[in-house]
Amino acid sequence: MGWVSSGDDRDSTIGELAELVAPFDALYASLWTQQHLPADILELCRLRLAQLHQCSVELQRHEIKMSAEKYQRLAFWGEDSVFSQAERACLAFTEVYAMDVQALTDQHADAVKMHFGDAGLVLLVEALGILDGMTRLSLLWQLTANAEQPNAPGQLL
């Protein structure tokens, strides 16, 4: 339980704002079913945000099933050949976005567009707003990780 609400996880905390639950759930679910950017790349970006913000509760969650190898090597995505050029472009964009949105360059955008076009870039920007916001809210709400469930591998920065 955090100082903001009596909930101890994301669903129960958001659930205290009943009028927001259905619209938020629909928006969040749409991220994982849209056609512009693969869901596995969004999951990598979501987890990288959690790593950068040191948010254990978000590292524990899994939106889609992925290989343990990518989870374990995510902190080293820039130098690990297990990540494709498309994944690297999105992860590079994600890292800059997490630290300073205004530092994003045309080169960051062009690298994403090379793989996913304008629609993919727009989707990534919108998704990062939601994913980064949820990670920061998990920290603000002081949500705690489940001690009985291991964190996702590769939580090193």
Image (cartoon, rainbow, N blue to C red):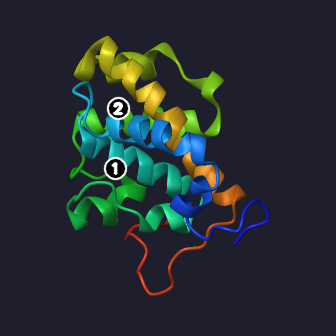
Secondary structure of the residue carrying tag 1 is: loop
Q: Residues within 10 Å of mark 2 (few under 14, many from 20)?
A: many
Residue 8 in which image quadrant: bottom right
The tally of labels here is: 2
Mark 1 burial class by Cα count in 10 Å: few <14, some 14-19, many 20+: few
Q: In terms of secondary structure, where does tag 2 sit?
A: helix
Using the image, determine if residue 154 lies above or below residue 150.
above
Residue at 40% across, 67% down:
154
**Residue 86, percent from left and from top:** 25, 33
- Amino acid type indicated by mark 2: Ala
Q: Position of residue 70 (x, y in %)?
A: 27, 58
Q: Amino acid at mark 1?
A: Glu
Which residue corresponds to mark 2?
89
- For the residue pair 114 and 60, the one nearer the viewer reads as 60
- The residue sitting at the bottom extreme is 148
Question: Image quarter for residue 99?
Answer: top right
Residue 110 in the image: x percent, y percent?
37, 15
Q: CA distance from mark 2 to mark 1?
A: 13 Å
Q: Is residue 157 visible?
A: no
In the figure, 33 relative to 4: above or below? above
In the image, 25 versus 83, the foreground residue is 25
